[in-house]
Image (cartoon, helix red, strand yellow):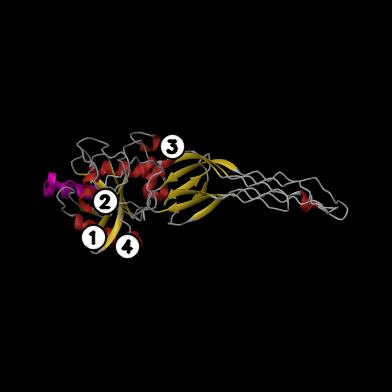
Amino acid sequence: MHFLDQAKIYIRSGGGGPGAVSFRREKYVEYGGPDGGNGGKGGDVIFEAVAGLNTLIDFRYSQHFKALRGSHGMGKDRTGAGAPDLVIEVPVGTQVLSEDKEEVLADFTEVGQRVVFLEGGMGGRGNASYKTSTNRAPRQHQPGIPGEEMWVWLRLKLLADVGLLGLPNAGKSTFINQVSNANAKVGHYAFTTLVPKLGVVRHKGREFVLADIPGLIEGAADGAGIGDRFLGHIERCRVLIHLVDIAGDDPAAAMQTVNAELEAYDEDLADKPQLIALNKVDLADQELAEGFAAELREAGADRVFVISGASGEGIEELLDAVLAHLPDRTSTETKGSEVEDVEGDGAGEWSPL
């Protein structure tokens, strides 16, 4: 399954059906009078958040969504049938944006949430409704109110409790594979992770969802590397795990580079609680690890966890700190969903909740 987190679609609600112009014609009835019925209502366009979806890939192949028009009125005072509503199913975490992406029109954060986005037009009046004491045989009618139409953007923000970030090759994929059920690709080159990955972490009887996004580099806010387009997937996380490679040239500078890109993207994201983890300690001696940890604290880190994503060293202490930032019951405990990686490598059904 391909991962797609943005899509532009065209939506249009159904127009109302026209009213009828009709007169009663029966044998032995000298003055039948008007009996044209009203038109039916057009279908609404409704967005609904459903479980089991984790990508907007369906909207790559179908970009136009049009609700049906209401039926026309008929003689014998028969009102036209209303058109069925058009329900567009989206993953939980989807936002509906205006065409210029400047306004959030709807935000879906719970399974089953429904929003009537565009209302169908009302049906037109038939000539029977125009009959008065002075206008006994009206021939006017209404054509029905047209439906509404617009282009919108859909943007998916995966819902996770904890976000994982760092420079490319900081060991994020190895870490998420170590602590969760994810199966992220690991390689000895930069940008092995090209799309966000999700995994469920089970630690001390509790569960939380961990999101791994592609690595950030200097200038990501300006489009360097993969850019910062995937940072939206960790905007709703309660805490961030910031991995710093101990084998890098300057771990303190690496931490500051990532934090600068977070601040350039969104100050609120930069202000989220961060747990700094000095990774790949299995490749260095204890004295070097302690020295780098001290440098990270001098550069602004409140607390530094020395870990190894490959061997598991120090990870339990880090996960204990994560639990301290989460509520007593996290999303996977309350919803009971099984989460797999977003690329669909796992066999189970994935849900962001």
Identify residue type, mark 1: His
Q: Secondary structure at mark 1?
A: strand
In space, the residues marked 4 and 2 are separated at their CA atoms by 26 Å
Residue ID for mark 1: 203
Lower position in the chain sequence, tag 3 or tag 1: 3
Quickly name the residue at label 3.
61
Name, please, the residue furthest toward the top. 224
Quarter occupied by residue 226: top left
Would residue 58 be counted in the magenta stretch? no
- Distance of mark 2 from mark 3, alpha carbons? 41 Å
> What's the amino acid at mark 4?
Glu
The structure residue drawn at horizontal position 26% and vertical position 59%, both measured from the top left corner, is 321
Span colored in magenta: 277-297
Name the front one of labels 3 and 1. 3
Q: CA distance from mark 4 to mark 1?
A: 12 Å
Please give the label number shown on residue 340.
Answer: none
To which residue does mark 2 refer?
Answer: 276
Residue that mark 4 sits on: 333
Query: Which of the two labelled residues, at mark 4 and mark 3, occupies the earlier sequence position?
Result: 3
- Which is nearer the N-term, disc 1 or disc 2? 1
Name the residue located 29 percent from the left edge and 50 percent from the top edge: 340
The residue sitting at 44% across, 55% down in the picture is: 109
Q: CA distance from mark 4 to mark 3?
A: 35 Å
Between circles 4 and 2, the one closer to the viewer is: 4
State the residue in front, 138 or 347: 138
Q: Position of residue 127 (x, y in %)?
A: 77, 49
Q: Secondary structure at mark 3?
A: helix
Inter-mark Cα distance, 1 to 2: 19 Å
Crowding near the residue tagged with mark 1, few <14, some 14–19, many ≥20 C-alpha atoms within 10 Å: some
Local SS, label 2: strand
